[in-house]
Image (spheres, grey):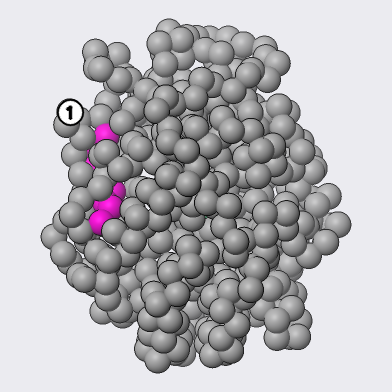
């Protein structure tokens, strides 16, 4: 494991955080600090919006050139990647990009993408697909594409796909879905599943129920969420993963807000917001109260969420995943604004001390657990959420700093790529544009800067994959 004590121009934590790392005693919870200082040198909004759109187009053109019709592009080598199953393609990046293209008013590209989906996307392939990923990426992408364009075949394709995923839910004795389902045969597999995979379906399935008038999608998703909630401890905490056949925990660590539980919490709040489901809202409040009570700690002047045993609250780890940087946004939307600002500052500090954010750190001993950067959107997702809530320009400024870092370090002639090691000097790049890039990072940035006429800033709601679930202005 790489230690952070090595002298470098930039370290993964600030000097204050490193100095107190490993300290035996956590500091008492501090009052919410003011926002971190904004990055200097930000252009005005119109210029920033144009820059973001140009960069999105640059990566989209790279995908089209090298990998059109395939799931993902390898922008350095010009290769392709099958995301769901070897030898099968779902044109993932096209589905991911569809509503982003529409929001950016790139209408020729919207037509190209929608035509491809309607003609080529086969939801009945002989492939064991991961249910969670298929729902948040493909079902969500098709729902959003339909809401944006009104093209009926997109909804038809979406319904067929969802019907082929449903056996994962209906064949499970507990209602919590199997991890995999074969889209052609309906065979299910994978009986141990983490919370995010069990319970991040209700936005996509709920919207599909609303749009088709068929209740079964909503029912399946809600039943799975309830099954998780019912297994909380007396402290109001959840573990990490469950055997979906027996209903027993296979890992009793509460690791919120990190993966692989992150979006379960997000979908409680978002399900309550989008569908007015008070029960989901109550569950969100109860569980979030426990996370704040038993897992939030302050070290080095920064907020962190430690891992604890769900039954006893005993500390089991001090890891922080980049994926957890979505949590400030969720905390803010859920009404815990002080905690939201506090945790946003933590991630801004990490961003300020690195070329781009590393995938995972241990804040207890200030080491990097994973020096990768997977071109992830979570930090800027929080910037967007908190800016939407407050209108505070500092979120735009920190978001622009994030964007500038990506452009400086991860832009390549074929688009944008992941990094293998962000602590190496120079940073070592990898060779993949993940599908979610087309759905998330540029969309959050663009919506912040563009005053986009196709987005209703009062009601707009995006899924965990950045898909527009509400607020399309047609
Ligand atoms: C995306 O697929 C979604 O944001 C998901 O909820 C988890 N994270 C990835 C991108 O990092």
Using residue 442 as the reference point, say whether residue 217 is left or right of it: right
Q: Which residue is mark 1?
A: 425
Q: Residue at x 32, y 64 (%)?
A: 60
Q: Is residue 154 above or below residue 27?
A: below
Q: Is residue 391 above or below residue 51?
A: above
Task: Using the image as rendered, state which of residue 279 and residue 397 is in the foreground.
Answer: 397
Q: Position of residue 204 (x, y in %)?
A: 62, 70
Q: Position of residue 69 (x, y in %)?
A: 30, 79
Under tag 1, what secondary structure? loop
Q: Residue at x 27, y 26 (%)?
A: 2
Q: Position of residue 306 (x, y in %)?
A: 57, 29
Using residue 421 as the reference point, say whether residue 303 is left or right of it: right
Mark 1 crowdedness (10 Å alpha carbons): few <14, some 14-19, many ≥20 = few
Query: Which corner quadrant of the image does residue 47 belong to?
Result: top left
Q: Main secondary structure of the magenta part?
A: strand
Query: Which corner quadrant of the image does residue 400 belong to?
Result: top left
The span picked out in magenta is 415-422
Task: Using the image as rendered, state which of residue 447 and residue 276 is in the foreground.
Answer: 447
Q: Position of residue 1 (x, y in %)?
A: 28, 28
Which quadrant, please, contains the C terminus? Answer: bottom right
Query: Which corner quadrant of the image does residue 298 belong to?
Result: top right
Task: Using the image as rendered, state which of residue 221 and residue 8 is in the foreground.
Answer: 8
């Amino acid at each position: 494991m790489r230690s952070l004590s090595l002298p470098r121009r930039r370290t993964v934590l600030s000097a204050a955080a490193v100095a107190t790392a490993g300290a035996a005693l956590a500091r008492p919870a501090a009052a919410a600090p003011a926002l971190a200082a904004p990055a200097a040198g930000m252009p005005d909004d119109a210029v920033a919006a144009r820059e973001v759109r140009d960069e999105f187009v640059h990566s989209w053109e790279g995908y089209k050139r090298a990998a059109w019709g395939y799931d993902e592009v390898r922008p350095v080598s010009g290769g392709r990647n099958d995301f769901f199953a070897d030898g099968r393609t779902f044109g993932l990046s096209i589905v991911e990009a569809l509503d982003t293209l529409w929001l950016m008013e790139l209408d020729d590209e919207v037509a190209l993408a929608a035509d491809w989906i309607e003609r080529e996307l086969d939801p009945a392939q002989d492939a064991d697909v991961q249910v969670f990923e298929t729902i948040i990426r493909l079902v969500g992408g098709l729902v959003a594409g339909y809401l944006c364009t009104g093209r009926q075949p997109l909804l038809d394709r979406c319904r067929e796909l969802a019907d082929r995923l449903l056996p994962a839910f209906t064949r499970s004795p507990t209602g919590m879905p199997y991890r995999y389902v074969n889209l052609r045969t309906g065979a299910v597999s994978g009986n141990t599943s983490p919370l995010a995979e069990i319970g991040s379906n209700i936005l996509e399935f709920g919207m599909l129920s609303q749009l088709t008038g068929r209740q079964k999608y909503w029912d399946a998703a809600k039943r799975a969420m309830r099954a998780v909630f019912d297994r909380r401890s007396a402290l109001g905490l959840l573990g990490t993963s469950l055997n979906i056949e027996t209903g027993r925990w296979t890992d009793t660590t509460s690791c919120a807000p990190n993966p692989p539980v992150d979006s379960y919490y997000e979908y409680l709040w978002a399900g309550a917001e989008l569908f007015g489901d008070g029960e989901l809202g109550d569950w969100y409040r109860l569980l979030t109260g426990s996370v704040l009570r038993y897992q939030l700690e302050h070290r080095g002047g920064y907020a962190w969420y430690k891992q604890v045993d769900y039954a006893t609250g005993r500390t089991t780890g001090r890891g922080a995943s980049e994926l957890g940087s979505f949590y400030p946004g969720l905390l803010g939307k859920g009404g815990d604004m002080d905690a939201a600002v506090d945790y946003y500052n933590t991630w801004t500090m990490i961003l300020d001390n690195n070329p781009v954010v590393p995938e995972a750190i241990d804040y207890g001993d200030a080491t990097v657990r994973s020096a990768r950067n997977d071109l992830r959107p979570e930090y800027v997702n929080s910037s967007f959420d908190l800016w939407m809530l407050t209108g505070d320009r500092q979120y735009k400024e920190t978001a622009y700093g994030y964007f500038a870092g990506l452009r400086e370090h991860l832009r390549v002639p074929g688009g944008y790529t992941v990094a293998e090691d962000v602590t190496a000097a120079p940073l070592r790049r990898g060779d993949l544009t993940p599908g979610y890039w087309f759905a998330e990072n540029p969309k959050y940035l663009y919506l912040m800067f563009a005053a986009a006429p196709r987005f209703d800033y009062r009601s707009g709601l995006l899924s965990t994959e950045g898909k527009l679930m509400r607020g399309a202005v047609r």
